[in-house]
Amino acid sequence: MKLQTIACAVAVATGGFFFTHVVSEAIAANDTVVRQGATKIQPTQEQALVTRQLATLVDRQHYLNQRLDSQMSKRILDFYIDSLDADHSLFLRSEVEKYQKQYGTTLGMALKAGDLSAPYAIHALYRERLTEFYQFMLAELKKPQNLKQKNVFIDTDREKAPFFNSKAEQHDYWRKMLVSQLINLTLSREEEQAKQKALKENPSLANGQDLSGPEDLTPEQTLTKRYTRQLERIGRLKSDDVLDKALNAMTLSYDPHSNYFPPVDAIELNRQSSLQLEGIGVSIRPDRSNEDYTKIETIVEGGPASKSGQVKSGDRIIGVGQEGEKIVDVIGWPSKEVVALIRGKRGTKVHLRLLGPGASLSQARVVTLTRDVIQEEDAGVRSRTVSITRDGKQHTFGVIEIPSFYLNYRARRAGDEYRSVSEDTNNALKALAVQKVDGIIVDLRNNPGGSLEEVARMLGQVIKSGPVVQIRDGNGNVSVFEDNDGGLQTYAGPLAVMINLASASASEIYSAAIQDYERGIVIGSPTTGKGTAQVQLDSLAYGQATLTQRKFYRITGGSTQNKGVIPDIKLVDIYNEEFGERKAKNALAWDTISTAPFKREGSVRPYVAQLAKSSQTRVTLNPQFKYLEQRKALAKKAEEKKRVVLDLDQRRAELLELEQKTLAAENARRVATGQKPYANWETYQASIDALAEARAKMKAAQRPALPEEEAFVLESAHVLLDYSQLQKAKGN
């Protein structure tokens, strides 16, 4: 649920949330640079006290009821080491083994006693080793580098790789890292220069938009600036940064949504309650697969990022620029410092250089956003109609787009007027019913969740009565949340619900209930799988925390946790699967409890097979779905590549092949839809950037849906029409 999700994040002036559990090298903006090793970082008495408090709470009050015993101690230690050294390239195997022997069975007991000596000692070596790494790379950058090493490879995914046995092995890997980074930057620079050349030769490609490129530095200059900056930051690390890593290693060893927030982040967390933030409206965190990248997790509906239509969940922020200034490379920056660059005064512009999931550096795009005050409820439920033609007859369907399950609790408590998603949806249902639509599609794609209370009300609008969701606590006690509106029902006609991997929490409760009651057809791709609820611990001695204490279950008994909601009719999943709960570390397992008594209100199951068959026939012939399937296949192939060659020519050839296949997919779609194909990759990239900029200047309500996105809506309308016709045929 979104309220619980909010409690798991730190609000920042980007207008979204900032996840702290994997933050590396958090820095105070006003700290001065100090020489590494000149000061020793030590825990304070307050930090020791909060460690005791939080350790006791996770030991006794977490949903898992898992004691902080020797087994859990080893798990926390391993998580802590991995949070510092995700690719196992800094610590040596002998050092890790020493820590495992020294602290492996006693860390939990030490934390319950407020003893932070173990994590602080490990962090001291981490800082030392990180300093060594940056100094090594800077020294190597002064030497000539061979970017054409045929048949020499580097592993790009070392999350589960063993730690190196010796300095020699370690340094060899570091040298390979440097060469690989130089190759990436060389290719990216070539691509950007080619695009700028195409724009210069044919200015019409820009379509009147500003498509200026980033700061033009050589790869060596870029890395020198990056590493120098990172080296300086090490000396500015504070005790809170170590505490953050240590306590989150403990909480996150239980589940991904139990978090600790140091005081500076807790202050930002509390700001979220105002629902009014100046920024662009995104939630960000370091990328799990590579913490050098800052990834956009979710997008706040109604914020500049959402309104632009250019920013997507999963995008990585690799550059930030202020209005009238060059874009600054932020790869390797701590997320807090990226946030500091993004935040700013209302009405000012910020330029983001973004990289999509699985994309190479050469495929980065620049998005310009105007900072604004973000009030989530400003952008609520939207409704519209779509029409499809079949057998010469036009059929019209209502579409209700629900960005979140919002409710202004503060205004309600104060007795003021307030908006709620249930009221807005109810009005939309009534308005569409007046238009005598053939059915209604509830669009929950990219909906992160929200109020459980609102879920119940909204389900009550389309079902007669009954249970909505079951809630289980760590002691096994189960409560049932019900629709208690006395049988009132706003809409009883044909219904479909659209979901995808970014549909989470409350969205999953709603779609699961619709599916279990067989009240409508669920269409799309499996949801996130966030089926837990957290309490906010705001009375700790130092900072704040969230703790998972409950789990949601469908009325049929299966949990929504981990597994998510599986749609009746599956369409292509456009998201990287790393986005969902199923890929999160220590995610709670899927399980079942007893079924809650309820009465089905429809009959969908008997028709699913035929509906799926008909849908697949249409999808196979649809140029938009063909395009999406091809792009997904290309992205998956790129993501599955765990080794890359250290040869510039071969990497350039591989990139060219990927670009040609991507361009071919795009041009095939354009030809099939009566559009002129792009002449080359540079023209395609420039045109796409121009389109994105032009769409950003439109008001959200006036911006036409992208054809590849609208294809899901139109196919849902076809499925709903199929369902209605099958029901009528059976009735006859």
Image (cartoon, grey):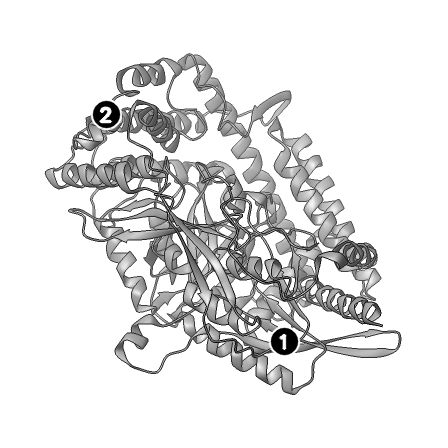
Q: Residue furthest right?
A: 391
Picture layout, residue 7 above or below residue 727: above
- Please give the residue where the numbered disc 1 appears in the rendered image: 492
338 or 283: nearer the viewer:
283
Residue 231 x/y as whole percent: 32, 35
Q: Secondary structure at mark 2?
A: helix
What's the mark number on residue 77? none
Q: Residue at x 37, y 37 (%)?
A: 254
Q: Residue furthest left?
A: 45
The quarter of the rendered structure image containing the N terminus is bottom left
Residue 28 x/y as whole percent: 24, 47
Q: Residue at x 60, y 77 (%)?
A: 491
Residue 263 x/y as whole percent: 21, 50
The quarter of the rendered structure image containing the C terminus is bottom right
The amino acid marked with disc number 2 is Ala
Residue 638 x/y as whole percent: 65, 38
697 or 48: nearer the viewer:
48
- Please give the residue where the numbered disc 2 appears in the rendered image: 118
Are there few (<14), some (14-19), or many (20+) residues within 10 Å of tag 2? some
Q: Is residue 650 left or right of residue 28?
A: right
- The residues tagged by marks 2 and 1 sit, at their Cα atoms, a distance apart of 61 Å
In primary-sequence order, the first of circles 2 and 1 is: 2
Q: Residue at x 83, y 66 (%)?
A: 674
Are there few (<14), some (14-19), or many (20+) residues within 10 Å of tag 1? some
Picture layout, residue 462 above or below residue 136: below
Q: Residue at x 47, y 73 (%)?
A: 421
Q: State which mark lies toward you, 2 or 1.
A: 1
The amino acid marked with disc number 1 is Ala
